[in-house]
Amino acid sequence: MDFLLGRYRNLIILVGVLFLQVLGLAVQVKRSGDAENTRLIRIWAVDAITPMERVLIWAQNGTRGIWRNYCYLRGVRAENRDLKQQVEQMRLQEVRLSEDAEQAHRLQQLLGFREQYISKTVAAQVIGSSASDLSRSIYIDKGSNDKIAPDMAVITAGGIVGKVLRVFPSTSLVLMINDQSSGVGAMLEKSRLQGVLRGTADGEVTLERVMSDEQVAPGETVLSSGGDQIFPKGLPVGTVTAVRPGKEMFLNIKVKPSADLSRLEEVLVVTEKQEQSPVADTGGRARAADILAERLPSVPDKPDAVVGSAEATGAGTKPDTAGHAADSGSANPGSANPGSASPGATVSVAMPQQAVKTGDAVSVSAAPAKPKTLQAKAPPPQSNPSNPQPAVTQDDPH
Amino acid sequence: MPITYTSGEQIEVYRFSIPVTVGVPLLALFVQAFLPRRIEAFSYIDLPLLVTIFFAMARRSPIAGLFTGAAIGLAQDMLGPYPIGIYGIAKTVVGFGASSLGAKLDVENVGARFLVTLAFYLVHAGVYFWVARFMVDLTLHWSWSRGMLAGVANAILGVGLYHLLDKLKQRT
């Protein structure tokens, strides 16, 4: 026995050390959340490494700041001029886009559309990586002291970066989207096809679970789908660079991430998301009367039945002149079809004094106009002349 | 590139001071955590593995080698996103193998060091992936192109690094 122990001493110790480590791994895997079991030793390791990284980052930023702010200012005047021109052009573009956005918000509100918004972010600086060439994760300089929690989304202005995996008091470990163990719900912008974004062994990103009979073209934008409950829907993820047939009837779609994952310096951690209905920017909440008025045909300048000081233009969109209308039946607001009214038909639009919440009923009735309603002559029919002449009324929100 | 067989009497066993024993692996871990974010090509390098191989080969003691590998690997695991022990097991095997090899072969010359480092990089990657896939059930995939490229890059850097670390050796 002594002979065996002496002869195979090295091997026995090797097996013993390996066995202990396998045992430790098994405990972590069995408990499925190793974060809590190994939290203390991970904190020690992170605390030993990150202070040095912080000092180096601080020195690097300081040097760079001095160089950029005081030394390297050549060409700033010309750049400033160009940027001013760009700002002017973008302002013009913004006016058009804001109109579109307001219209989209109003329609979304009509449909009771609910969306997740990023309501609060915390800016953080990347201070290091995981000291492993086989995983893709980074350390940021914000932790539980800054209200960072696991599974929070990490993004940049360019696109998504990853999610918070572990949180320490003043640092956090972020698993990036190009790590092999990560998975992000994503969809193609044009075709709206959904898939799962995964990292590869080479540090690239692929979109999986898209059927091979679908048409996907290189250059198409990939957005977050929101299906993973971590990233809000619609954030830029990347661009399709190559499409090849993959395994099991699925396509192998290679994606170039929008965010430059290899040169991250600052990131944003989404600490708070809000689920709410979109609200049009102009005048706070959109009023149902406004929405209906936009769908109605044009109104004569001075209709006889106008009560109060309602202005004819815009079909009584001023809420101050609102009155209460009779409630007779209900219908989807979208069913009001102004173009289908016969010549001479009466269209009455009630204008409530209070903003209408999503889900409030909008009624369509053939009842005669009540007092305090705006009556307008409908234009000649444009389509579906067989339709009865409806009077569109808005239920009293009270 | 001669790899000569050396008898036990001819082998020179080295030792290292405590600051070197502790400081060099810590520095390697720190650089590994810091540099890949600044220099993308450095993401192919596994500096803690090179340090493990160097210490194991220089000490020529399998037990010292496996404990060095285990300690460095576990420390690397603590900084990573996966369960602790995957790097630990891989580097334990490498430390044991490198020191056993160092006790039998003359691995002081450049060619031998290059080949040994390349071979142990692949062994390390093989053990790592085996443990990660079949024991921890991580969905990791092996890429031969990346693996070979990283192996050669590590071997080249290793040769230069060992030359620098040779200056820290102390004869017993």
Image (cartoon, coloured by chain):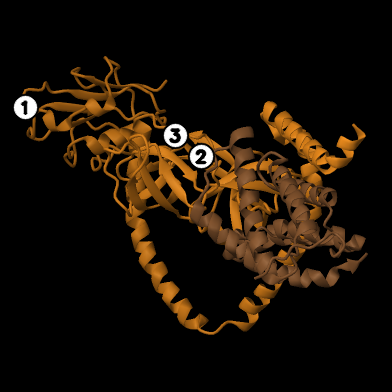
Q: Which residue, as the protein is rendered here, is positioned at the far top?
A: A329
In front of the other: A167 or A32: A32
The chain letter under disc 1 is: A
Q: Give SS at disc 3.
A: loop
How far apart are the two marked residues, 3 and 2, measured between alpha carbons?
A: 28 Å
Q: Give SS at disc 2.
A: loop
| A392, above or below B109, in the image | above
Displayed quadrant of residue B27:
bottom right
| Colour given to chain A in the rendered image | orange
The chain letter under disc 3 is: A
Quadrant of the snapshot with the N terminus of chain A: top right
> Horizontal placement of A267 versus A41: left or right?
left
The image position of residue A341, as x and y in percent, is 12, 28
Q: Residue at x 43, y 73 (%)?
A: A84
Q: Earlier in the sequence, mark 2 or mark 1?
A: 2
> Horizontal placement of A158 versus A243: left or right?
right
* Residue type at the position of mark 1: Pro
